[in-house]
């Protein structure tokens, strides 16, 4: 048996893929550095297969030579799950060349796409058929559908349509043995044993390589209305959510929470982005609402304006701005989606992608912010996220004037413990939509139910006995 990463392995991989599709040497930083520029690895090589058959053959070659591999889509992940370690002995498996939309079935409301398709390409293919694929993320122009499924991505419309898991009916997966599971059924009902699909969704490439998926489509709405409302308290924002659910029902497709601190951060770094609510409104919170109507624009506008009028009268909102055109609606969403970019411009920060029972969010934020200020006076809380499904991006920025890198290095363990303890006390989760990767692997091991962890390790050992599939991500190495 050859040693891991020897020349024989690379020669055979080159013969398999072609010299142009096996990259070695310098200049691989785009694959080896994660989006947050926090994890930088070194790959043995970057393999770029163009078909599922090539993926399967490559996985068989890795198993023969005992070379571990790291699957990667658009490399937009936030937890370091898609970049190699620093050993120089891991194969980076890029799926970007698997770009075919294989089928759109209008009658069955399904679309089959390969893993390397950008999310925006999947949305466009659905739109060309007069249908909707509702998964929507800030990175949709660069993230891939395979990565979305591998991390069980969420986004802004989970409230109405669910996360990636709920939007997938079937998968094509290359197993750690290099076999291809052809599970691309488009059935809503298939009660024939274990749900293998759900094993691979959210497994972050540790159990197999997703190469294609059959996805749910929906009728496209006839009208979409968007508004930004200023709320005096988090409790008021929660009351507005209840009002919107009761009044709009399934028409409510988005309900995003944005703190005033987030809006100021965007204004500082992107002053060209319009901010329709005045900074002196006296409201520390804002919510971005979206209604998707299957009647017409007039009906959607009337519903939204009535809802906001009642909220203003009840004191749940103190001001509101309703988009008067598609361009204005896009500006409102651009404001929301620019928050992570503004944070990046501000410097390294401590990110928390957490989920809580929606009812627990106001008390959690109040308690946690007080504890953070007591621990590190002047620390800045950048809190935003998907209030409608209980997912907060509860990020912590260094006090003004402090070096962000030093703050991250010195404060991250203590601040993580402070935040995660309070999340778990309220029945929450340390990862809502970003996954575990390297970033939260130790927190998962320390916080997950021991029985659940043993079951996860048993599945990993059963499916990947050689431990070659994205080792050291999600689960600790044995």
Image (tube, rainbow, N blue to C red):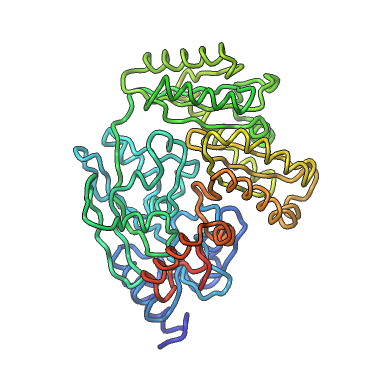
In terms of image quadrants, where is residue 380?
top right
Left or right, 385 with reference to 190: right
Q: Looking at the image, which is closer to me, 326 or 406? A: 406
**Vertical order, 374 against 63 (above or below):** above
**Looking at the picture, how far across and down is residue 368, in whole percent?**
68, 41
Q: Which residue lies furthest to the left in this view?
A: 107
**Vertical order, 317 against 421 (above or below):** above
**Vertical order, 101 against 4 (above or below):** above
Task: Pick the quarter of the image with the N terminus.
Answer: bottom left
Q: Residue at x 61, y 42 (%)?
A: 394
Q: Looking at the image, which is closer to me, 30 or 468? A: 468
Q: Residue at x 39, y 33 (%)?
A: 160
**Looking at the picture, how far across and down is residue 435, in whole percent?**
50, 53
**Looking at the picture, how far across and down is residue 23, in whole percent?**
46, 69
Left or right, 148 with reference to 367: left
Q: Which residue is drawn at 28% across and 52% down?
A: 170
Q: Which residue is drawn at 42% across and 62% down?
A: 205
Q: Looking at the image, which is closer to me, 178 or 354? A: 354
**Looking at the picture, how far across and down is residue 125, in whole percent?**
31, 41
Marks counted in the figure total 0
**Vertical order, 25 against 399 (above or below):** below
In terms of image quadrants, where is residue 239?
top right
Left or right, 147 with reference to 231: left
């Amino acid at each position: 048996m050859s040693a891991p990463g020897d020349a024989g392995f690379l020669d055979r991989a080159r013969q398999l893929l072609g010299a142009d599709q096996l990259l070695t040497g310098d200049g691989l930083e785009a694959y080896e550095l994660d989006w947050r520029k926090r994890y930088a690895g070194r790959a043995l090589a970057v393999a770029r297969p163009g078909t599922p058959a090539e993926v399967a053959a490559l996985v068989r070659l890795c198993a023969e030579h005992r070379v571990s591999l790291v699957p990667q889509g658009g490399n937009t992940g936030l937890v370091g799950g898609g970049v190699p370690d620093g050993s120089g002995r891991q194969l980076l498996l890029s799926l970007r060349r698997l770009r075919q939309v294989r089928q759109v079935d209008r009658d069955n409301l399904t679309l089959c796409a390969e893993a390397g398709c950008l999310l925006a390409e999947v949305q466009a293919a659905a739109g060309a058929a007069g249908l909707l694929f509702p998964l929507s993320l800030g990175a949709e122009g660069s993230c891939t559908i395979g990565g979305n499924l591998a991390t069980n991505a969420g986004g802004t419309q989970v409230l109405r349509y669910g996360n990636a898991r709920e939007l997938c009916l079937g998968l094509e997966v290359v197993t750690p043995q290099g076999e291809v599971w052809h599970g691309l059924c488009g059935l809503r009902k298939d009660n024939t044993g274990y749900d293998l699909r759900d094993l691979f969704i959210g497994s972050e490439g540790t159990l197999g390589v997703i190469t294609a998926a059959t996805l749910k489509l929906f009728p496209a709405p006839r009208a979409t209305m968007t508004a930004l409302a200023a709320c005096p308290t988090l409790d008021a924002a929660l009351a507005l959510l209840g009002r919107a659910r009761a009044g709009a029902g399934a028409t409510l497709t988005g309900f995003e929470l944005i703190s005033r601190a987030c809006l100021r951060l965007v204004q500082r770094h992107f002053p060209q982005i319009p901010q329709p609510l005045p900074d002196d409104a006296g409201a520390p919170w804002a919510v971005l609402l979206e209604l998707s109507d299957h009647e017409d624009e007039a009906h959607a506008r009337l519903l939204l304006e009535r809802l906001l009028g009642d909220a203003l009268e009840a004191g749940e909102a103190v001001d509101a701005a309703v988009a008067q055109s598609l361009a204005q609606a896009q500006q409102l969403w651009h404001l929301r989606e620019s928050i992570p970019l503004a944070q990046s411009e501000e410097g390294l920060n401590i990110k928390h992608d957490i989920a809580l029972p929606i009812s627990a969010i106001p008390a959690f934020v109040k308690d946690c912010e007080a504890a953070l200020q007591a621990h590190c006076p002047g620390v800045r809380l950048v809190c935003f996220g998907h209030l409608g499904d209980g997912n907060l991006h509860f990020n912590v920025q260094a006090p003004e004037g402090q070096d962000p890198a030093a703050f991250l290095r010195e404060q991250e363990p203590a601040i993580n413990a402070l935040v995660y303890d309070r999340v778990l006390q309220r029945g929450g989760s340390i990862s809502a939509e970003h996954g575990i990767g390297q970033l939260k692997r130790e927190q998962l091991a320390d916080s997950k139910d021991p029985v659940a962890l043993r079951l996860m390790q048993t599945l990993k050992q059963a499916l990947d006995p050689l431990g070659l599939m994205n080792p050291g991500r999600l689960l600790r190495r044995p």
